[in-house]
Amino acid sequence: MTEQPGELDRQDPLPAGPGRFLPPPGVIYLDGNSLGPPTPEGLARCRQVLDDWARLGVGGWTDADPPWFSWAERLAAREAGMLLGARPQEVAVTGGTTINLHQLLATFYRPSGRRRKLVADALAFPSDLYALRAHAGDDLVLVPSRDGRIIAGEDVTSALGDDVALLLLSGVLYRSGQLLDIAGLTEAAHAAGALAGWDFCHAIGIVPLELDAWGVDFAVWCNYKYLGAGPGALGGLFVAQRHLGGPPALPGWWGSDKDRQFEMADDFLRAADAGAFQIGTPPILGIAALDGALDVYAEVGMEAVRARSLRLTRFLRERVEAAGLSVVTPTADAARGGHIAVAHPAAARVGRALRDAAVIPDVRPPDIVRLAPHPLYTTYTELATAADTLAAVVAERRWERYPAGRGRVT
Ligand SMILES: Cc1ncc(COP(=O)(O)O)c(C=O)c1O
């Protein structure tokens, strides 16, 4: 392939065609790993929900099409097959990542006797660290990073011994974009007699997951990044078949057997599947937006999404590095998630200069500018412009025009 972006766009076009996701107009949107844009299908379904709410009131739970009451279960089945390599009964679309993490830690982190440690990585998302500390206290062991960017697999495995109850890691690290060896580390946890749980926020919808084949015990994720479920939309959780059937630590009526929920029994008649881990009433607008976005994914398939994602991030990385900038995301395809992380000591100010030049990145302290192409809406031409803009912002020190201090939240 020639490296001319226009030619690459002809050879490797948007796989579902243009206009299938709707990033904000007039900008190059590279922040879909923070908040993904909507799809026309998702917006249409959201409008339908609003109309049904006005038309049917509470009747929407049973009489809307599809009925709101069981919509999350339908979506769980879609995500299971299309994105997760899981069985429908192992997945629930529910809650949020942090809430789901608390639910599954409270249920599956069971320190006993000598086996007490919870091993996680020091580069985990802060909310995960807060939850992990709350559950494990002094038994939390954080595997350090040697360079502050990457977690070495052997450092994780050497932390696993017969005193470890649970390994909890992120599939793709939120700052550097490193993709961990999910299968290998899960196997290592099992070999040590521990369970393996995962946070797939930065993996779902961009990296194909094979949770059953890899033997993952449980997992959580959000749907508002690559999957375009909308601001604050509900997340998801996976519990392997072999762990289903027991009580969730944090029960709520939405985890009831759907056929019996409205018996309003004082005793919790829990669902037999992963739906048992739901807690309360789900927000339906997020479900509607997610369902629409999954239609686009269904047309393309995760293998094609991943293949184009790798081509886009390879192209972007080469352009950014050619401008003399430092990319901290691993080079190998097998170790790279969906975004490219550029290190710059004035990252927050560089980010503001980029936004003013109509390129939307996000910034993660202390020094990372994240650029996330999405294979279903990003073109090579956009990436070339974004890389040129970044190069100019740095070469001309345009970022110095922006005061140091807190940046915008993205
Ligand atoms: C890796 C990771 N874990 C957890 C979270 C927290 O998600 P939520 O706010 O939905 O609980 C995020 C949010 O961006 C994240 O990126």
Image (cartoon, rainbow, N blue to C red):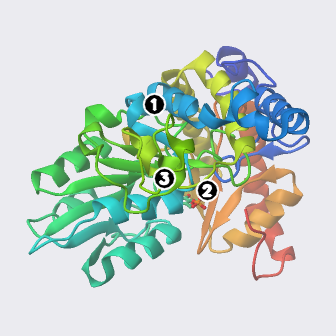
The N terminus - image quarter: top right
Reading the chain from its start, which is encountered first: label 3 or label 2? 2
Mark 1 CB within 8 Å of ligand 1: no
Query: Residue at (42%, 53%) from the top-left corner?
Result: 268
Q: Which residue is mark 3?
A: 329
Residue at image mark 1: 80
Q: Which residue position holds label 2?
A: 324
Spatial distance from mark 1 to mark 3, Cα to Cα?
Answer: 28 Å
Q: Are marks 1 and 3 in contact (CB under 8 Å)?
A: no
CA neighbours of label 3 inside 10 A, class few (<14), some (14 to 19), many (20+): many
Relative horizontal placement of residue 354, taking residue 141 as reference (left or right): right
Q: CA distance from mark 3 to mark 2?
A: 15 Å
The local secondary structure at tag 2 comes to: loop
Q: How busy is the neighbourhood of tag 2: few (under 14 within 10 Å), some, or many (20 plus)?
A: few
Mark 3 or mark 2, whichever is nearer to me: 3
Residue type at mark 3 is Thr
Q: Secondary structure at mark 3?
A: loop
Alpha carbons under labels 2 and 1: distance apart: 42 Å
**Quick one: 203 or 231, which is closer to the camera?**
231
Q: Which residue corresponds to the image point at 62% horizontal and 74% vertical from the top-left?
A: 345
Q: Which residue type carries mark 2?
A: Gly
* Residue 326 sits above or below residue 387 on the image: below
Q: Position of residue 400 (x, y in %)?
A: 81, 75
Q: Is residue 159 above or below residue 257?
A: below
Whether residue 43 sits left or right of residue 374 in the image: it is: right
